Image: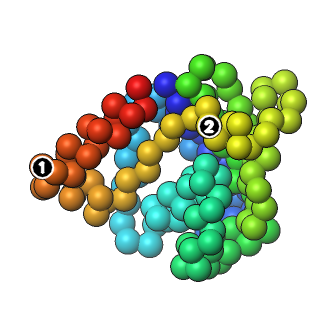
Amino acid sequence: MTRIKSITVQRSKFFQSPMSINFSGKLNCIMGGRGTGKTTLLRFLQSVIMPSIEEDKSVFGLLKSNLKDGKIILQVENLNGELFTVEKTLGEEPVVYTMERSLVDFNSFRQSISIDFYEASQIEKIATDPSERLKLIEIGRAHV
Protein backbone atom coordinates (compact mmCIF):
# COMPACT_ATOMS: atom_id res chain seq x y z
CA MET A 1 0.00 0.00 0.00
CA THR A 2 1.24 3.49 -0.84
CA ARG A 3 1.17 6.06 1.90
CA ILE A 4 2.55 9.44 2.73
CA LYS A 5 4.23 8.88 6.08
CA SER A 6 5.05 12.51 6.83
CA ILE A 7 5.36 16.03 5.49
CA THR A 8 7.83 18.67 6.60
CA VAL A 9 7.59 22.23 5.33
CA GLN A 10 10.66 24.41 5.72
CA ARG A 11 10.72 28.22 5.44
CA SER A 12 7.00 28.60 4.74
CA LYS A 13 5.47 32.04 5.12
CA PHE A 14 2.24 30.43 6.32
CA PHE A 15 3.30 27.62 8.66
CA GLN A 16 5.72 27.92 11.57
CA SER A 17 9.05 26.65 10.26
CA PRO A 18 9.76 23.83 10.22
CA MET A 19 6.24 22.36 10.31
CA SER A 20 5.98 18.56 10.41
CA ILE A 21 3.04 16.18 10.40
CA ASN A 22 3.20 12.39 10.71
CA PHE A 23 0.28 10.70 8.97
CA SER A 24 -1.65 7.59 9.94
CA GLY A 25 -1.33 4.46 7.81
CA LYS A 26 -5.09 4.61 7.35
CA LEU A 27 -7.40 7.51 6.52
CA ASN A 28 -6.21 11.06 7.24
CA CYS A 29 -8.57 14.03 7.44
CA ILE A 30 -7.38 17.60 7.72
CA MET A 31 -9.89 19.67 9.67
CA GLY A 32 -9.82 23.25 10.87
CA GLY A 33 -11.46 26.63 10.66
CA ARG A 34 -11.40 28.97 7.71
CA GLY A 35 -7.90 30.29 7.01
CA THR A 36 -6.04 27.69 9.06
CA GLY A 37 -4.11 26.19 6.10
CA LYS A 38 -6.12 23.10 5.12
CA THR A 39 -6.10 23.90 1.40
CA THR A 40 -2.50 25.12 1.55
CA LEU A 41 -1.40 21.83 3.12
CA LEU A 42 -3.36 19.84 0.52
CA ARG A 43 -1.78 21.83 -2.32
CA PHE A 44 1.69 21.35 -0.80
CA LEU A 45 1.12 17.57 -0.80
CA GLN A 46 -0.30 17.56 -4.31
CA SER A 47 2.53 19.70 -5.72
CA VAL A 48 5.06 17.09 -4.60
CA ILE A 49 3.15 14.06 -5.91
CA MET A 50 1.61 15.76 -8.97
CA PRO A 51 3.91 18.71 -9.86
CA SER A 52 1.84 19.52 -12.96
CA ILE A 53 -0.74 21.02 -10.55
CA GLU A 54 1.51 24.10 -10.52
CA GLU A 55 0.35 24.80 -14.10
CA ASP A 56 -2.97 25.96 -12.60
CA LYS A 57 -2.41 29.70 -12.03
CA SER A 58 -4.55 29.84 -8.88
CA VAL A 59 -2.72 26.86 -7.36
CA PHE A 60 0.67 28.32 -8.29
CA GLY A 61 -0.34 31.64 -6.71
CA LEU A 62 -1.35 29.89 -3.47
CA LEU A 63 1.90 27.91 -3.40
CA LYS A 64 4.00 30.97 -4.21
CA SER A 65 2.43 33.14 -1.52
CA ASN A 66 2.73 30.43 1.15
CA LEU A 67 5.98 28.64 0.25
CA LYS A 68 8.04 31.20 -1.70
CA ASP A 69 11.63 29.87 -1.39
CA GLY A 70 10.76 27.16 1.14
CA LYS A 71 10.91 23.40 0.70
CA ILE A 72 8.40 20.57 1.08
CA ILE A 73 9.77 17.18 2.15
CA LEU A 74 7.65 14.02 2.07
CA GLN A 75 8.43 10.58 3.41
CA VAL A 76 6.56 8.14 1.15
CA GLU A 77 6.15 4.37 1.21
CA ASN A 78 5.47 2.89 -2.25
CA LEU A 79 3.37 -0.12 -3.25
CA ASN A 80 6.33 -2.46 -2.54
CA GLY A 81 6.93 -1.05 0.96
CA GLU A 82 10.07 0.84 -0.09
CA LEU A 83 10.66 4.17 1.66
CA PHE A 84 11.55 7.36 -0.19
CA THR A 85 12.22 11.00 0.60
CA VAL A 86 10.80 13.46 -1.91
CA GLU A 87 11.95 17.09 -1.77
CA LYS A 88 10.20 19.87 -3.68
CA THR A 89 10.75 23.59 -4.10
CA LEU A 90 8.36 25.82 -5.98
CA GLY A 91 8.70 25.64 -9.77
CA GLU A 92 11.17 22.74 -9.66
CA GLU A 93 10.72 19.04 -10.38
CA PRO A 94 10.62 16.94 -7.19
CA VAL A 95 13.87 15.20 -6.23
CA VAL A 96 13.45 11.62 -5.00
CA TYR A 97 15.90 9.69 -2.83
CA THR A 98 15.93 6.21 -1.39
CA MET A 99 16.49 5.97 2.35
CA GLU A 100 20.18 5.40 1.51
CA ARG A 101 20.13 8.81 -0.30
CA SER A 102 20.47 7.32 -3.79
CA LEU A 103 18.74 9.44 -6.42
CA VAL A 104 15.63 7.98 -8.09
CA ASP A 105 13.98 9.10 -11.33
CA PHE A 106 10.78 10.99 -10.41
CA ASN A 107 8.70 9.41 -13.20
CA SER A 108 9.70 5.89 -12.12
CA PHE A 109 8.88 6.77 -8.52
CA ARG A 110 5.51 8.27 -9.53
CA GLN A 111 4.58 5.03 -11.32
CA SER A 112 5.30 3.04 -8.14
CA ILE A 113 2.78 4.96 -6.00
CA SER A 114 -0.97 5.46 -5.89
CA ILE A 115 -2.28 8.31 -3.74
CA ASP A 116 -5.70 9.97 -3.88
CA PHE A 117 -6.56 13.44 -2.59
CA TYR A 118 -10.15 14.53 -1.90
CA GLU A 119 -11.34 18.00 -0.96
CA ALA A 120 -14.37 18.45 1.31
CA SER A 121 -16.67 19.22 -1.62
CA GLN A 122 -15.61 15.99 -3.34
CA ILE A 123 -16.26 13.96 -0.19
CA GLU A 124 -19.71 15.53 0.15
CA LYS A 125 -20.48 14.68 -3.48
CA ILE A 126 -19.37 11.06 -2.93
CA ALA A 127 -21.59 10.86 0.17
CA THR A 128 -24.69 12.19 -1.58
CA ASP A 129 -24.39 10.79 -5.12
CA PRO A 130 -24.50 7.00 -5.69
CA SER A 131 -22.86 7.34 -9.11
CA GLU A 132 -19.89 9.10 -7.46
CA ARG A 133 -19.56 6.21 -5.00
CA LEU A 134 -19.49 3.78 -7.92
CA LYS A 135 -16.72 5.83 -9.56
CA LEU A 136 -14.76 5.61 -6.31
CA ILE A 137 -15.16 1.82 -6.26
CA GLU A 138 -13.96 1.64 -9.88
CA ILE A 139 -10.91 3.75 -9.01
CA GLY A 140 -10.15 1.35 -6.14
CA ARG A 141 -10.38 -1.63 -8.45
CA ALA A 142 -7.99 -0.01 -10.91
CA HIS A 143 -5.41 0.41 -8.12
CA VAL A 144 -5.49 -3.25 -7.09
For disc 2, the neighbor class at 10 Å (few under 14, some 14 to 19, many from 20) is: few
For residue 121, above or below residue 140: below
The amino acid on which the numbered mark 1 sits, given as a three-letter code, is Pro
Task: Give amino acid for label 2.
Answer: Gln
Q: Position of residue 4 (x, y in %)?
A: 56, 37
Of the image marks 2 and 1, the number of the one nearer the N terminus = 2
Q: Give the SS element for disc 1.
A: helix
Q: Is residue 99 above or below residue 115?
A: above
**Residues tagged 2 and 1 counted as in contact (Cβ below 8 A):** no
What residue would you read off at disc 1?
130
- Residue at position x 26%, y 37% from top? 137
The percent coordinates of residue 121 (x first, y second) are 28, 63
Q: Is residue 111 left or right of residue 131?
A: right
Mark number, residue 84: none
Please state, as top left, top right, bottom left or bottom right, where the C terminus lies in the image: top left
Is residue 30 in sight in this rendering? Answer: yes
Residue drawn at x 57%, y 74% is 56
Q: Secondary structure at mark 2?
A: helix
* 139 left or right, relative to 95: left
What residue is pinned by disc 2? 111
| Residue at x 87%, y 30% (from the top left corner) | 102
